[in-house]
Amino acid sequence: MLLITGLGNPGTSYSNTRHSIGFRVIDWLARERDITGWRLKCKALVANTEFKEQKIILAKPQTYMNNSGESVVSLLHWYRLSTQDLIVVCDDIDLPLGKLRIRGKGGDGGHRGLRSIIDLVGSKDFIRLRVGVGRPLEPDFEMVDWVLSRFSSEEALVVGQMVEKAAQAIKTIAADGIEKAMNMYN
């Protein structure tokens, strides 16, 4: 069984923001699998599916980004999973828009959602798929305003392609392992 968690902020005021790109990837996977049965469990919206005979839990924590670990640790305990069964999808301002980076373990890279997960699960050993949202062109732009901003209409095509590519990367991880996914998508 795998727990695939997309990070973001709950509520319509945060939908389609850079910080909620993880939710968009999870939503893409859910649409592809015709999943509509979301339910609230462990402070997250969750849905179950299968892929290549493997059970998959899709999750979107509803705790706000900086407290994502609360939901993730609860879900891991509820489903009796280890961090080896966890894939986290999140935004990354240090990657250009459209780029992906898959890692099997590592630090938080300054991402507070990842920091919350690492702190509460007590491990850095989980797969993370970072989705590039880029940095603002203006050097004085406040980073919090940037990650909470929506993508421009000019960025929409790249964002759509990136979300689909991220979903494909997750399916590759689930079916063929992280090494193959890293070789294909990094």
Image (tube, helix red, strand yellow):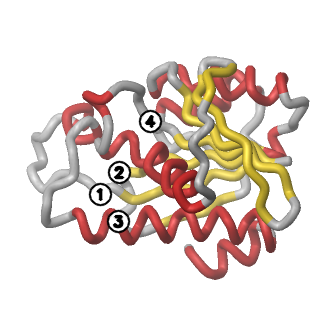
Compared with 29, 118 (above or below) is: above
Q: Which of pointers 3 and 1 lies earlier in the amino acid sequence?
A: 1
Q: Is residue 76 left or right of residue 59?
A: right
Locate the C terminus by quadrant. bottom right
Q: Which residue is mark 2?
A: 93
Instruction: Give how far apart the Cα atoms at labels 4 and 3 are.
Output: 17 Å
Instruction: Give how far apart the Cα atoms at labels 4 and 1 are.
Output: 16 Å
Q: Which of pointers 4 and 1 lies earlier in the amino acid sequence?
A: 4
Mark 1–mark 2 CB contact (< 8 Å)? yes
Q: Which residue is mark 3?
A: 160
Tell me the amino acid under the disc marked 1.
Answer: Gly
Dot 1: what SS? loop
Q: Is residue 69 visible?
A: no
Choose mark 3 or mark 1, whichever is in front. 3
Q: Which mark is residue 134?
A: 1
Q: Which of pointers 2 and 3 lies earlier in the amino acid sequence?
A: 2
Instruction: Give how far apart the Cα atoms at labels 3 and 1 are.
Output: 15 Å
Q: Which residue is mark 4?
A: 8
**Residue at (12, 48) in percent of width and height:** 139
